Amino acid sequence: MTEKSCKVINIVTPGKYILNGLWFGGNSPKRAIIFIHGLTSNVFANHDLVIPLADKNTAVITFNNRGHDMIAKIHKVDKRKKKGYTSEYIGETHEVFTDCVDDIQGVVNFVRKSGVKEIYLVGQSTGSHKSVYYITRRGKRKFIKGVVLLSPMSDYASALKFDKKGQLKKATDVARKMVEEGREHNLIPLDIWEQMDDAQRFLSLYTPESEEEIFTYAQPVKIPSTLRKIKIPILVILAEKDEYRDRSMKQIAEWFKKNVKARNKKIVILENAAHNFKGNEKDVLYEIGAWLRTITLM
């Protein structure tokens, strides 16, 4: 393989789910960057944010986590079946957030088996939530050297911002009742909530007590205990014009400065950037590249 070449990889998670991925870079890199996409995104999206970082010493891996696209089918290895697997539906609509630990661990295991010694996680949007959650649930792993959070916004705060007609409370009440009745994977009626979310996914995304509500700047008295557990080097890149922000990005940046407890931390606001950093990819690459150089020199 050449330094910028790409190969398709198939990842089997500890839970036996099969994930599709792409590996950019050489065969025997010193380090690997694992990119964790956001809701409804997929393995092919946002390459300009990370792929140029691949070289002979650095592999970049993108993959489909269980939040890819709106509704998708995933296979699970099952040798008892004639075809060798079973199937179930995932995607933004049906994903269970805590499954991200199994997804990310599958990729980490794949990379480790390839002989890579240093791993860095880069999460975008909901991928930021997943990166933080994974690290805090897998304990101290010396080979995970750092984490980058791109546009780490609160979905709960965003929902409050856009809730002009009181639909959020109504949808929350309906979703809770559906879960109590054992219908957690049934869709919330579209006349109650216009997005295609099943009941448990809605509650995970848009309620303040959810495990997924990691960036709790919309709740002044709530301590973001999950985020505060991160001790490895962390880079937070915020988009000044993020369409999902509910307050100024300077205020959000100050919240991160206060609540990120890692000794080696950097919080950056990219001027005039939107949530997906479209048009600001070179700025993102510069920040990640500069940060990586400081980490590797430690």
Image (cartoon, grey):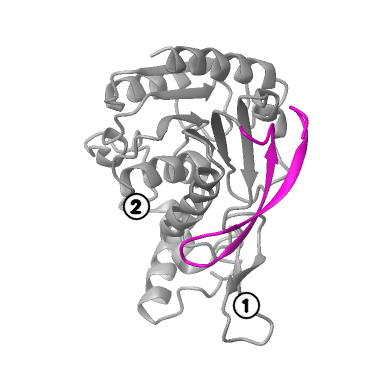
Identity of the amino acid at label 2? Answer: Glu
Q: Quadrant of the N terminus?
A: top right
Q: From the image, tell me which residue sits under label 1.
A: 85
Residue at 32% over, 49% down: 137
Asked if residue 166 shows in the view, the reply is no
Query: Residue 106 at what x, y percent from top left?
Result: 51, 54
Does the magenta segment cover residue 146? no
Identity of the amino acid at label 1? Answer: Tyr
Element class at badge 2 = loop
Query: Residue 255 at what x, y percent from top left?
Result: 33, 24
Asked if residue 167 shows in the view, the reply is yes
The residue nearer to you, when weighing 138 against 281, is: 138
Q: Choose top left, top right, bottom left or bottom right for residue 250.
A: top left
Q: Residues within 10 Å of mark 2 (few under 14, many from 20)?
A: some
In the image, is 32 to the left or to the right of 7? left
Decide which of tag 2 and tag 1 comes sooner along the chain. 1
Q: What segment is highlighted magenta in the picture? A: 1-28
Q: From the image, tell me which residue sits under label 2.
A: 211
Q: Choose top left, top right, bottom left or bottom right for residue 91.
A: bottom right
